Amino acid sequence: MEASSYSHQADEIQLLQTHISFVVLAGLYAYKWKKPVNMGFLDFSTLEKRKYFCNQEIILNRRLCPEVYLDVVRITRQGDSFCLNGHGEIVEYGVLMARLPEDRMMGRMMERRLLARSDIERIVAKLVPFYERADKSEEVNSCGSATVVAENILENLSQVEPFIDNDILRRRQFERIRDFTTNFLGHEELFALRQEEGRICDCHGDLHSGNICLVDEVCIFDCIEFSDRLRYGDVAADVAFLAMDLDLHGFEELSGYFIERFIDCSEDPMILSILDFYKCYRACVRGKINLLTAITPTLATGVALQYRAQAKRCFALAQSYIPVS
């Protein structure tokens, strides 16, 4: 947080954090440091693992925004002093990124009600060729099976269940979400057909508004680097994440338009048969992430309450995708 630590001008340094990362905004750059945590679905618990995943983060994110992900950086120690990219013992690795304009972040534009159909068109134009180019190897394709998808679904449900309480997620609400998603997994032929049609690929994995910047060349960043299993999957699972996020923020019309345009451009009408299943799953994932962030010890109380309120909205949205019987 000290300007003297940087070899470039670093005015108004800001520190942000999620449940798994610290992000330092310093001048024209952003530095992302992984927290030494093991949450089951990710493991950053050792220095070597953090180094490996920093490299993976750069390689994978350069697929969609190569101009943003610049290099792996390190913190070194000599005696009692620490230095950025200096000599001595390496005590931490991080990712150096070009800083994106905050006023063009999709979330900020949604807050100001500036998001338009033209922005959705540009996102679709970025995503469709990305999925066409993405790895569709046998290993990747296997992750579209009902068995592997079930592993992801059940893992997420098991991580959500300890948070059940009347304020955020009621037991009955959780059971309805669990029953809908697990019963849907019984449609094994649908998952198999998605595999046969080549709709399983090395996706982004975390496609929501917080990871999209609507500059002239749309930048979609911060893909999942810590788990191949959570990144490999049906393109329907990826686009369902963004559609769900648009629903969550009150942009239901643009959510529908996004799916409509994606189907048209990708020639994939079958997405509609599996969309609500993946929307429900993604809403639960976002609910869990908000709860994990809310319990971060260093988070201000007011901010933690905001994350808890957002989690409650996510679980309510997940339930809304369940067909009325």
Image (tube, helix red, strand yellow):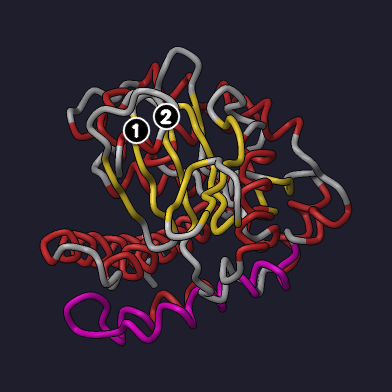
- Residue 321, given in percent of the width and then of the height, sits at 39, 60
Coordinates of residue 153 in the picture (x, y in percent): 56, 72
Q: Amino acid at mark 2?
A: Tyr
Task: State the residue position of label 2.
Answer: 29
- Residue 64 against residue 142 in the figure, above or below: above
Q: In the image, is residue 286 above or below residue 324?
A: above
* Residue 146 colored in magenta in the image: yes
* Residue projecting furthest to the top: 216
Q: Residue at x 44, y 61 (%)?
A: 20
Residue ID for mark 1? 26
Could you tell me if the residues under marks 1 and 2 are in contact, i.e. CB atoms within 8 Å? Answer: yes
Circle 1 sits in a helix, a strand or a loop, which is it? strand
On-image quarter of the C terminus: bottom left
Residue 245 versus residue 75: which sits nearer the camera? 75
Pick the residue in front: 197 or 34: 34
Secondary structure of the residue carrying numbered label 2: strand
- Quadrant in the picture for the N terminus: top left
Give the x, y percent position of residue 95: 54, 42
Q: Front-most of 263 and 124?
A: 124
Quarter holding residue 87: top right
Image quadrant where residue 243 sits: top left
Label 2 crowd (10 A; few <14 / some 14-19 / many >=20): some
User: In this orientation, which residue lies closer to the viewer: 13 or 303?
Assistant: 13
Q: Which residue sits at x=48%, y=63%?
A: 281
Magenta stretch bounds: 145-174
Look at label 1 and name its amino acid.
Ala
Residue 267 in the image: state x and y as whole percent. 67, 30
Q: Residue, x 54% and y 51% (percent of image)?
A: 76
Q: Residue at x 46, y 58 (%)?
A: 282
Label 1 neighbourhood size at 10 Å, few (<14), some (14-19), many (20+)?
Answer: many
Q: Is residue 288 magenta?
A: no
